[in-house]
Amino acid sequence: MDPKGFFKFAKENNAVQLDMKFCDMFGTWQHCTYPLDTLDEGVFEDGFGFDGSSIRAWQAINESDMIAIPDPSSARMDPFFAIPTVSVIADIYDPITKQPYNKDPRGVARRGIEYLKQTGIADSCFIGPEPEFFIFDDIRFATTQRGAMYEIDSSEAAWNTGKPELTGNLGHKVGYKAGYFPVAPSDSLVDIRGEMVQLMRDLGIVVEAHHHEVGTAGQCEIDMKFTDLETMADQFLWFKYVIKNVAKKHGKTVTFMPKPVFEDNGSGMHTHISFWKDGDTLMAGDGYAGMSELALHGIGGIIKHGRALVALSNPTANSFHRLVPGFEAPVTLAMSQRNRSASCRIPMYSSSPKAKRVEFRTPDPSACGYLSFTALMMAMIDGIQNKIDPGEPLDRDIYDMTPEELAETNVAPT
């Protein structure tokens, strides 16, 4: 969609506002809203000025002027404004040099994709994340001069089996590590997830499935169909935006914290990645688990750089509460087919060559998608360029390995 097409789209949808969104380094959407009748096509060249010093980790106050140039192809009708509003994602530029801003995560992703093409290895990188999240009914926290506290609650939490409720406690609570795939009434959030999914579909996001996850207290997962890296990183921001706002509409709150509940599964973002060229996959071959030599070298790159990747794929202090053995959060940097205790799993659901991919299971949804996905891609590129050997596969339950055996493996920071 070009600028002319944007204004046609806005008119067809009776939009009266433009909401400009951009992403900071921490994966948080920022926004500013403008009356559409004050704008013309020039805004897609001139952009909007804003204070870069007020965005975390960006500009010093003496160099604070920045420009956000909206991308007309990203236009979507925003489902949460009371007034009809068209949203666009913006790219950030330096007003002095006129160059893309080096701290704009979307720009980082674009430069990474261009580098992939320049190497000649592939022309496309496809990403399929599986973000998990918790839907809570209540969350309270405080840090004051006299103490600190936090408390979370969920109507379906295991700790509420003995709680008096206004309409009577009907049971159907989800036990610890017992929430995978139960039907209603244990899965009390199925209709809320359905509403989230429908809004995502209206925004052009292809959703493959949604379900309750392993954890008690409202852990859920919604799976998006894989697509190219930049599109998926854009979609990941819409994904979070939709989920949080639908939950709020229903009087609930969502967290993408990796480990909000002690002694239960945390929320991961298992990330599937594959390289393609001229419309064909580069991942299938005659090697281990039906993978190509190129794919295995790519896995070698992920394993080699795994400890560094964690800085971007698991960026919060809470991330490391999740990265402990026994809760489906792999910490051993190893390759294996089907094996969910390995950081690099090769899914074996399908025999189709086009389904071949590697699943990096360490990341969590607190990450900035642009940075996490791009870092993973760059690690694979390095593995391919330098023919890095991924080592022997660990086709066993890694959680049952002895400390002596684990000492001989590569382990992610925990």
Image (cartoon, rainbow, N blue to C red):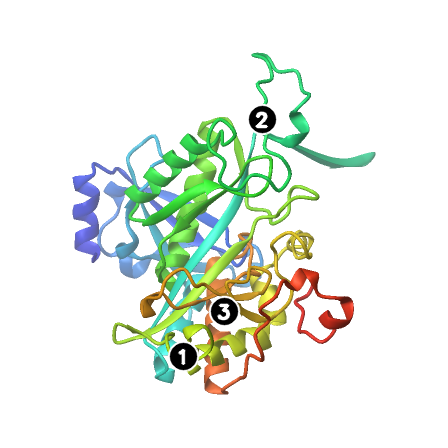
Residue 137 place in picture, x, y as percent: 57, 29
Tell me the quarter of the image containing the C terminus: bottom right
The type of residue carrying mark 3 is Leu
Crowd around label 1: few <14 · some 14–19 · many ≥20 (10 Å): some
N-terminal-most mark, 1 or 2: 2
* Residue closer to the observer: 82 or 328: 328
N-terminal-most mark, 3 or 1: 1
* Residue closer to the observer: 241 or 7: 241
Examine the rendered structure and indicate whether residue 137 appears above or below residue 271.
above
Q: Is residue 77 left or right of residue 362?
A: left
For the point 54% across and 73% down, the residue is 302
The residue to which callout 3 is attached is: 376
Callout 2: SS: loop
For the point 42% across and 36% down, the residue is 193
Query: Residue 58 occupies which quadrant of the picture?
Result: bottom right
The residue to which callout 1 is attached is: 292
Callout 3: SS: helix
The answer to whether residue 386 is seen in the rendering is: yes
Residue contact at pointers 2 and 3, CB within 8 angstroms: no
The residue to which callout 2 is attached is: 155
